[in-house]
Image: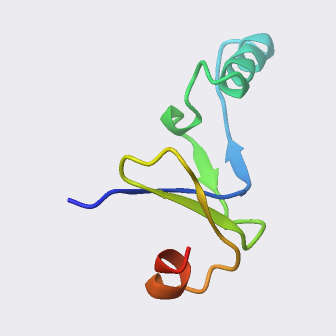
Amino acid sequence: MAKMSFRFMTEVEVELKAESYEEIYLMLKDMMHGQRPISAQSNVKIFPPEQSSMYFSMEGERELHEIPQFKGDFKRDILEH
């Protein structure tokens, strides 16, 4: 089974609900510090990438490789980089 990871800059909107605004703020603070995963929130909107640059790594790699201009062509986007 093949596995790849992609990283790109995008805009995310998260709606948080709690008993108070302070509790919501603390939830946001935990997310910004990586202590609470953004993807685990129930109301998350992810928008298309802001830039055309994208990065990828193959299974087992720690290094990210850049796709300078996403073209939608596996050979040009992945194999050449």
Position in image of residue 41 (x %, y %): 54, 34
Q: In which quarter of the image is residue 54?
A: bottom right
Position in image of residue 58 (x %, y %): 41, 57
Closer to the camera, 13 or 17?
A: 13
Protein image colouring: rainbow
Horizontal placement of 17 versus 26: left or right?
left
- Relative to 76, does residue 47 appear above or below in the rendering? above
Q: In which quarter of the image is residue 69?
A: bottom right
Horizontal placement of 39 versus 69: left or right?
left
Position in image of residue 68 (x %, y %): 70, 74
Q: Quadrant of the N terminus?
A: bottom left
Q: Which residue is drawn at 75% across and 19% down?
A: 29
- Relative to 49, does residue 23 appear above or below in the rendering? above
- Relative to 39, does residue 12 appear above or below in the rendering? below
Q: Which residue is drawn at 66% across and 30% down?
A: 16
Q: Residue at x 65, y 18 (%)?
A: 18
Position in image of residue 52 (x %, y %): 73, 74
Horizontal placement of 26 versus 64: left or right?
right
Q: Quadrant of the C terminus?
A: bottom right
